[in-house]
């Protein structure tokens, strides 16, 4: 079993900060809000039916299944989020609520371990019959993650036993032996979950089962071809139309996959499991596939906000460099999945490029998914919005201009919740020889080097200020490596140790201080935080002649409320000075960018003319992309014309 | 009855020229090609089934209906085209073929006059039952147009009698009297057709019926609301989803309609009939609606190629100024319909703005619909194509990168054919006091002023050259007005009469010479033909920072075969000289535009960077948009970056 890669959640506490405030919001507002949604007690929200379905399956009430066939997973993700909260903030009422809920789930589970309320209540004869469309193993994976989180948070084995029984059934059912099903799930998730379960239970057979699923995927003869022949399905769903099995990453064995394809969340859940397995088994070939896939995501498929999935129909990867801003899918769940993959790649090899994307995606794409009040959510995260077009164009029908309380397909809100409540897992890595800090946020981290405990206190106003103070307090003087990430966007960073400038080499994106640490040693890291104009590779035709503004990890956008309508008529002169300013009373306290720019005048009514456009001077204000759509409906724009 | 507005087809002959060569192509290649398609004798084309259906309905063969429910209209449009050909180029074999075909159609017609092979063979109980989806009156309208054209070309009443019987049935069936159906067709066409029939037969009741259909449209209570209630239809087709009855222009009475909405072809067929009726009845209110609708099309909905219909789902008008280039629908039929509307507006009031759009749409959007060999066609006419994205993106699935021999829904090819074979109708207008020339192409026009015949000979290499020579030969010396259009794009024009410069006032886009004409009088019109950079109104965000190239009426585009891949990486410096050159061996002899431009270099693999782009010098060649995709598959681009 590979060693843990970070401190347990209860060994990390957060102070105030841009990220930590969102994590607190999840604990205090989002978790009870989502509990109301799952129980259908949220006025104005789409009906969920999730708890209802479990109560019916458990025999606690009469009724019929309601909702989408895979929504049991919404509940599993919520349990995971609630468990994370219990780990850091004990709460007797929530603990008891979870116990009652787990009791219902245990009652709903069939004697052989099977658990899927849709199949149990609606199509029991379809068990494991349609793996490419139904999501039984996906749901199982989320329950396994929930069971692991609940056990780690509370020490209780109630849900862990339920999911082990389910995992045992899966292990008996799927495999290459006679009588077993040689198939795998259309929506990856079980693989990464079984690897987690193996680690917490010490049962390596779960990780062998994960490896079997991963290696079987896309192998010839293709399982899904046989499956649709058996089901007499003539026509795959429209989402599959360009891709066929590439839609679910089963077009080739995973070790031959080099280009990310198909449904983005599925793809990234697979890659996450592949990276985890590569580390677990020191599997160089699999690690190499992961590096190739990562490289292509980073170089050809990543929105500047860190979102992925540019094709709205099927929530898919598009052609390399085809990154439309107004029709972006960039699903919140896909951003989260990319963060999971980045984390596993950091575990595989400490390289700042993974943390750079993790930070970009978290601060921008993922945080945009949740309103400042924690009560409404985005599923789709476009980079350019004109409300009138959104309402009218068919190819914008996936876009919402305002966050909503819940979704018919509500995968994103609880996924954001479970990730932000486990924020500590993404801020640092613990190694045998020390620690690495990936994200900078006011926090205290307790960890061990050998048998010695170390307490690390981080103070910073990042991302608004580039100064990060790290105070080191080992139980006794101790030799270890403190690695501080120098973000990819950062050109200038200074490091002082106890007031003295110390030279630090940047190795793969990390500045390393290796010494015998004394109690009270203080490192001050100082990043220059200029405003950058980012330009897209010219292969991205959508962004030709445009720039995106970034300061630190924050990508900015324009909103109509600050800049008036017709955002595409604004243009930033190439020599304009871009002023970062902190606005304590705006959006809860936020850094903005202001500049003197030009606005192209509308010369008249003619649609086409030979006259050159004229411009007038105006002021531009950009706010962090993550905070758009918190002040009513209006236009929004990330990529701004340059002149 | 209003007077005819142009000379009969057989009174106009064409020499060689960009437009006339295409008309000849239709006569010689397209008409027999489409006859093969309608008879299912075209290898590699989608099956039509059209003739087959009529033969089955006539009892000439056994079989079942095949194809789309409205495709009888494809045959009607083909008959119209073939009749136009007979009018100008007598052909015994074609004449006999038409006689045989009309005999079949007459046998297929039911005794009461009803004619619609789909309803007759598949759902006879649905006659007139579902006017919003079925196209019975639309088909009837096309047969009426065919009957009129066949009669005008041949003097034979065979098809005219069939369509009069059909029109009589319609007149008995639809109206406000008790027992009549107070409804109208979901796809407009019957209105403009009945107005034509009234004119050729002298029966004003047909024009009253057209007026009833026009005025009833959108009146309260809405007929379609009652219809879907009666049919128990809960959900309208997806194309209607944003618009509901606006999709088919029945959201309000037509006299209250100000903004073009819904399916573009339907809308323009309606507006065409409205303009015709306004002239017929001197109906100022209706004319005012037409002017408003025209104005909004011209100022907010027109592609620079003259295409309309920017929303692919539903082939509809989009938001004002929302004119995406890559997802443009700009259907060939919608361009043709706009030409019909422009012609009727010219009849209503001689104003060059109507002829400007007519010329723009014909030379660019419409001619692009047909390959140089006359054997393949576009239905959709985008302004920007990247084949890899077209294949992969769902929101490009309506786009084809190469023309095809036929379509499952084959409205466009015969519509192009019937319009180009009647080209003479769009080149000029005849008035009581003289003539106006709208389009310039080598031709001879015979017309009358009072009782005196006049022969007009036009010689020109327009659109490649701006010189137009008009030789006037009246039967005897005669006072009349010769009006020569000065195109809206033309800033400088000189007029010489018999070698002397004469001052001419431009009145509403026309230069008028009013005098007593002598045999041999010669007018030489000379337009300066510089290359223009057109800029879109800044409200069109899709075209910000871009220019389109136009010379004369020709809009240009870039093709990958001339300019290499990555057309969006090219940029025209604001001071670049744009050289028009004629290439006799390219695409059958064509004017191109060449310029020294910049190509943005791809700096490396990074997707986002802070470095400014670098450029290298390169040569650009632009060809007429109408001729794109005649040299294999590749990228295409109309709106070019400027730097």
Image (cartoon, coloured by chain):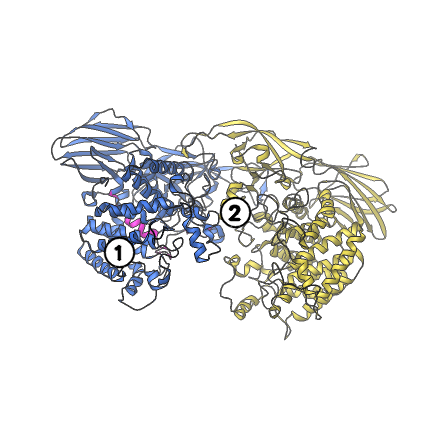
Chain colours: A yellow, B blue
In terms of secondary structure, where does tag 1 sit?
A: helix
Considering the numbered disc 2 on the image, is that residue within a helix, a strand or a loop? helix
Q: Which mark is residue A481?
A: none
In front here: B546 or A143? Answer: A143
The numbered disc on residue A396 is 2
- Determine if marks 2 and 1 fall on one subunit: no
Host chain of mark 2 = A
Farthest front residue?
A: B178
- Decide if residue A278 is in sight here: no
Judging from the image, mark 1 belongs to the subunit labelled B
Residue that sits furthest to the bottom in the current view: A178
Give the residue pinned by disc 1.
B32
Q: Nearer the viewer, residue A19 or A456?
A: A19
Depth check, mark 2 against mark 1: the one in front is 2
Residue B420 rendering spot, x and y as whole percentages = 28, 47
Q: Please identify the quadrant where the N terminus of chain A is shown.
A: bottom right
Work out how far the residue at label 2 is from the one at label 1, CA to CA, in angstroms: 42 Å
Is residue A87 among what the camera can see? yes
Q: Which residues are magenta?
A: B396-424
Decide: is A170 above or below B541: below
Q: How many marks?
A: 2
Q: Is residue B315 left or right of residue B167?
A: right
């Amino acid at each position: 079993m590979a060693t843990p890669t970070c401190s347990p959640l209860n060994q990390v506490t957060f102070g105030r900060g841009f990220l930590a405030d969102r994590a607190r919001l999840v604990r205090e507002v989002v978790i009870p809000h989502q509990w109301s949604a799952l129980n259908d007690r949220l006025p104005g929200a789409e009906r969920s039916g999730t708890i209802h379905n479990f109560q019916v399956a458990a025999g606690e009430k009469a009724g019929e299944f309601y909702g989408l066939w895979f929504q049991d997973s919404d509940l599993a993700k919520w349990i995971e989020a609630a468990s994370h909260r219990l780990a850091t903030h004990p709460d007797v009422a929530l603990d008891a609520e979870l116990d009652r809920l787990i009791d219902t789930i245990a009652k709903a589970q069939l004697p052989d371990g099977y658990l899927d309320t849709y199949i149990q209540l609606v199509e029991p004869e379809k068990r494991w019959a349609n793996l490419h469309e139904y999501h039984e193993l996906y749901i199982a994976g989320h329950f396994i993650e929930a069971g692991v989180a609940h056990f780690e948070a509370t020490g209780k084995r109630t849900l862990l036993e339920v999911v082990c029984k389910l995992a045992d059934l899966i292990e008996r059912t799927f495999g290459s032996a006679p009588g077993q099903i040689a198939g795998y799930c259309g929506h990856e998730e079980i693989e990464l979950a079984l690897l987690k379960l193996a680690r917490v239970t010490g049962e390596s057979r779960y990780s062998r089962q994960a490896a079997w699923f991963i290696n079987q995927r896309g192998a010839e003869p293709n399982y899904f071809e046989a499956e649709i022949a058996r089901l007499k399905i003539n026509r795959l769903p429209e989402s599959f139309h360009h891709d066929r099995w590439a839609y679910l990453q089963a077009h080739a064995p995973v070790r031959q996959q080099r280009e990310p394809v198909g449904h983005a969340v599925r793809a990234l859940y697979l890659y996450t499991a592949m990276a985890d397995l590569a580390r677990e088994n020191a599997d160089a070939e699999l690690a190499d596939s992961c590096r190739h896939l990562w490289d292509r995501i980073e170089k050809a498929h990543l929105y500047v906000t860190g979102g992925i999935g540019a094709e709205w129909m099927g929530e898919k990867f598009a052609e390399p460099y085809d990154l439309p801003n107004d029709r972006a899918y960039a699903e919140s769940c896909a951003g989260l999945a990319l963060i999971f993959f980045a984390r596993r790649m950091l575990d595989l090899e400490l390289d700042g490029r993974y943390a750079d994307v993790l930070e970009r995606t978290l601060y921008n794409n993922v945080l945009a998914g949740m309103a400042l009040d924690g009560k409404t959510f985005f599923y789709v995260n476009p980079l350019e919005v004109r409300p009138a077009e959104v309402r009218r164009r068919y190819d914008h029908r996936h876009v919402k201009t305002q966050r909503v309380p819940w979704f018919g397909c509500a995968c994103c809100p609880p996924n954001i919740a479970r990730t932000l409540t486990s924020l500590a897992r993404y801020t640092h890595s613990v190694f045998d020889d020390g620690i690495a800090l990936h994200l900078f946020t006011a926090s205290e981290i307790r960890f061990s080097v050998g048998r010695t405990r170390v307490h690390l206190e981080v103070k910073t106003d990042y991302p608004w200020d580039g100064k990060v103070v790290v105070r080191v307090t080992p139980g006794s003087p101790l030799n270890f490596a403190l690695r501080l990430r120098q973000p990819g966007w950062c050109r200038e960073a200074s490091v002082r140790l106890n007031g003295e400038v110390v030279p630090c080499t940047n190795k793969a994106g990390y500045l390393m201080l290796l010494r015998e640490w004394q109690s009270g040693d203080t490192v001050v890291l100082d990043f220059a935080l200029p405003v950058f104009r980012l330009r897209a590779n010219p292969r991205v035709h959508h962004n030709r002649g445009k720039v995106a503004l970034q300061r630190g990890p924050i990508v900015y956008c324009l909103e109509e409320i600050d800049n008036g309508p017709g955002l595409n008529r604004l243009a930033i002169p190439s020599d304009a000075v871009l002023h970062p300013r902190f606005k304590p009373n705006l959006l809860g306290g936020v850094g903005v960018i202001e500049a003197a720019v030009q606005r192209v005048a509308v010369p008249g009514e003619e649609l086409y003319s030979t006259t050159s456009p004229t411009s007038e001077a105006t002021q531009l204000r950009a706010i962090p992309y993550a905070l758009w759509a918190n002040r009513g409906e209006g236009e929004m724009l990330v990529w701004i014309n340059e002149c």
